[in-house]
């Protein structure tokens, strides 16, 4: 029978605790040496139920060569300590990237998202320990197992530091290294709980060493990391990092319940964090994701986009979208084809020309199709494509997109080599005129204006 995987419920979505499947597959294939004691869904030899309660997994792996796998973004239900004994290892927490060096110690809080590998595991020996402190939300109290022998005041101090700072990587000491090595030896020799006494002593020693290490640092504590406001902050962040949650049928009551709060307190925190009501914020996130899908998923119909983002009808979606972006979803999708031409500062009075330039930038038009527009700008179609590609690949400057100062584009007239000069070709409705008001010569008919590119 498969073992149940602990879950963290958050706005009717769920986070499953990591199963370490890539590690199991690598160990089975003989790519890494792997030793662990575990319970529940974690891999390793089974820990007896009556010993070391709260330990989810404890062990180490040893990789002598670079691997083709990594432990991608995941969460664990407990406090996790890892220690890199040798090698170098990519590591990330909440989007911050690190490269672990030998003797680096990491601490992640329950359900804190993290990754091991960059993206794959390199050669190295890594130790770990996960203890479940029985929390499912940041504002819940941590409950340590009774076999931890730190004095109540020491355990409270350690808990306070771990809960209220966001530094995940620390420099370990020689004593910490020796402690993990002793734990590894006890894990390797354990059979049906035979190393329980040694493991109990070594793990208690490890937490004392961790407390001493943290005491020696100048740590800035942030009480908001464990408060109800933090719970709401993480809840709201999931709408942008986990867009599949947008499709759920939400009410303010369901949102508040997912955070373990009453409606009044939940609404208060949301307004403090976002300056809008909860449903308003949710619809903003849905509309932002809808705009992304309209830009990047042309195969999806407007109705599909509406339902994917959690709207109950395409008509309601279109109304909110038009109110937010000033155009309908269909018009937004059409305008997206021309976003590159907009960055190039072309005259938007002729939408057909805009679309032509946008398509030319993306390589979707033949030269003869782009020719009329290019000719109007006194450029060949290939030169127009090169110019658009060069300008955009250079990235935006202080004033937006434009030609880098002193840059000469092949096939482009010399008077276009003005820093940030617009590509907009201008012609008055009554025909091109010279500066005195008379008819312009052919060479004066189309001149680039000196407007700057806008972002």
Image (spheres, grey):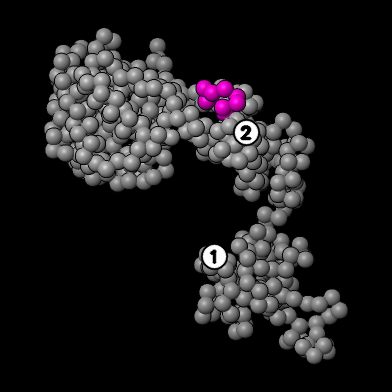
On the picture, is 293 further left or further right than 136?
right
Q: Nearer the viewer, residue 268 or 91?
A: 268
Q: Nearer the viewer, residue 317 or 62?
A: 317
Could you say where residue 362 lies in the image, as x and y percent from the top left? 61, 60
**Which residue has dot 2 on it?**
278
Which label belongs to residue 234? none
Q: Can residue 12 be seen?
A: no
> Of circles 1 and 2, which is in front?
2
Vertical position of residue 374 compared to residue 34: above or below: below
On the picture, is 102 further left or further right than 400?
left
The residue sitting at the top extreme is 50
Quadrant of the image containing the N terminus: top left
**Which residue has dot 1 on it?**
396
Q: Can residue 419 be seen?
A: yes
- Identify the residue at horizontal 77%, vertical 65% (top origin): 350
Q: Secondary structure at mark 1?
A: loop
- Identify the residue at horizontal 17%, vertical 34% (top origin): 176
Label 1 vs 2, first from the N-terminus: 2
Label 1, label 2: how many angstroms apart (C-alpha)?
35 Å
Q: Which residues are magenta?
A: 259-266
Quadrant of the image containing the C terminus: bottom right
Could you say where residue 155 lies in the image, as x and y percent from the top left? 26, 24
Query: In the rendered structure, does residue 261 fall within the stretch colored magenta?
Result: yes
- Identify the residue at horizontal 29%, vertical 25% (top origin): 156
How crowded is the residue under tag 1: few (<14 C-alpha within 10 Å), some, or many (20+)? some
Q: Nearer the viewer, residue 18 or 23?
A: 18
Q: Secondary structure at mark 2?
A: helix
Vertical position of residue 22 compared to residue 358: above or below: above
Residue 245 image-quadrant placement = top right
């Amino acid at each position: 029978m498969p073992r149940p995987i602990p879950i963290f419920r958050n706005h009717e979505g769920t986070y499953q605790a990591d199963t370490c499947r890539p590690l199991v597959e690598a160990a089975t294939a003989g790519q890494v040496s792997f030793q662990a004691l575990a319970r529940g869904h974690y891999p390793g030899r089974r820990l007896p139920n009556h010993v070391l309660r709260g330990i989810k997994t404890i062990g180490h792996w040893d990789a002598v060569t670079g691997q083709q796998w990594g432990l991608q973004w995941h969460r664990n239900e407990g406090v996790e300590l890892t220690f890199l004994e040798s090698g170098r290892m990519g590591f990330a927490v909440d989007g911050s990237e690190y490269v672990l060096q030998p003797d680096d110690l990491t601490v992640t809080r329950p359900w804190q998202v993290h990754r091991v590998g960059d993206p794959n595991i390199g050669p190295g020996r890594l130790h770990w320990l996960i203890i479940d402190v029985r929390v499912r939300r940041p504002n819940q109290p941590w409950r340590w197992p009774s076999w931890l022998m730190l004095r109540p005041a020491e355990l409270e101090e350690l808990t306070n530091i771990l809960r209220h700072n966001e530094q995940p990587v620390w420099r370990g000491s020689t004593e910490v290294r020796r402690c993990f090595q002793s734990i590894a030896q006890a894990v390797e020799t354990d059979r049906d709980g035979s190393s329980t006494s040694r493991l109990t002593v070594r793990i208690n020693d490890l937490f004392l060493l961790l407390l001493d290490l943290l005491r020696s640092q100048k740590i800035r504590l942030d009480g908001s990391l464990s408060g109800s406001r933090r719970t709401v902050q993480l809840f709201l962040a999931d709408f942008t990092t986990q867009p599949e949650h947008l499709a759920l049928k939400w009410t303010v009551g369901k949102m508040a319940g997912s955070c373990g709060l009453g409606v009044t307190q939940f609404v208060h925190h949301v307004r403090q964090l976002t300056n809008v009501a909860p449903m308003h914020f949710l619809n903003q996130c849905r509309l932002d994701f809808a705009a992304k899908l309209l830009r990047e998923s042309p195969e999806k119909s407007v109705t599909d986009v509406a339902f994917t983002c959690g709207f109950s009808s395409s008509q309601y979606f279109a109304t909110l979208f038009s109110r937010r972006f000033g155009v309908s979803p269909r018009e937004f999708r059409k305008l997206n084809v021309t976003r590159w031409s907009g960055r190039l500062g072309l005259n938007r009075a002729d939408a057909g020309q805009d679309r032509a330039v946008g398509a030319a930038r993306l390589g979707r038009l033949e030269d003869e199709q782009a020719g009329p527009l290019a000719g109007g700008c006194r450029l060949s179609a290939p030169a127009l494509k090169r110019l658009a590609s060069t300008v955009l690949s250079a990235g935006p400057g202080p004033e937006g997109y434009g030609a880098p100062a002193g840059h000469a584009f092949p096939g482009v007239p010399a008077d276009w080599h003005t820093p940030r000069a617009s590509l907009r070709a201008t012609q008055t409705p009554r025909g091109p005129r010279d500066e005195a008001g008379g008819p312009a010569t052919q060479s004066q008919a189309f001149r680039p204006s000196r407007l700057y590119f806008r972002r």
